[in-house]
Amino acid sequence: MIDLIVSLRDHPDAPGHVFRLVAKDGHPAAGTTVPEPAAALAAVERFGEDVFFPQPGPPRVCTQQYGGPQIAVVTGTFHGRDVHSTFTRTDGCEIARWNAMGPLLGGTAT
């Protein structure tokens, strides 16, 4: 089961948008409000384990590019595990995380 709530802001002082993804048995379920539920579920199933629960590893080198002031906080459960992840666009690594989960965050994957 997946039950995730996304709180998204275009910048820190902007009003927020809230989306929800609920999935049972591999399909979006009642209560889902993300714009494209099937795409959001596909992104979460493909990248969720690595994005929500990253394993320690060697230091990463991230490009020093700025993708914008957007911020998203994802909370809830992913296959029985608690999720609390923050997404930003502050450097290349964070932009890549954002893009991978784009459909969950109300956009598209790139």
Image (cartoon, rainbow, N blue to C red):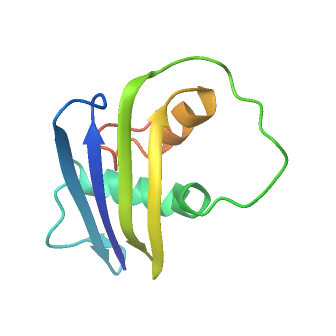
Q: Give the x, y percent position of residue 90.
A: 52, 27
Question: Would you say 9 lies left or right of 100 here?
Answer: left
- Residue 33 falls in image quadrant: bottom left
Q: Which part of the image, by quadrant, shows the N terminus?
A: bottom left
Of 28 and 1, which appears nearest the observer? 1
Q: Give the x, y percent position of residue 102.
A: 39, 41
The residue that appears at 37% across and 50% down in the rendered structure is: 73
Of 72 and 102, which appears nearest the observer? 72
As drawn, 17 above or below 44: above
The residue that appears at 70% across and 28% down in the rendered structure is: 62
The residue that appears at 65% across and 18% down in the rendered structure is: 64
- Of all residues, the one furthest to the top in this rendering is 65
Q: Give the x, y percent position of residue 84.
A: 44, 62
- Of all residues, the one furthest to the front in this rendering is 13
Q: How many marks?
A: 0
- Residue 70 falls in image quadrant: top left
As drawn, 35 above or below 55: above
Q: Give the x, y percent position of residue 25.
A: 34, 81
The residue that appears at 56% across and 35% down in the rendered structure is: 94
Question: Would you say 33 lies left or right of 47 here?
Answer: left
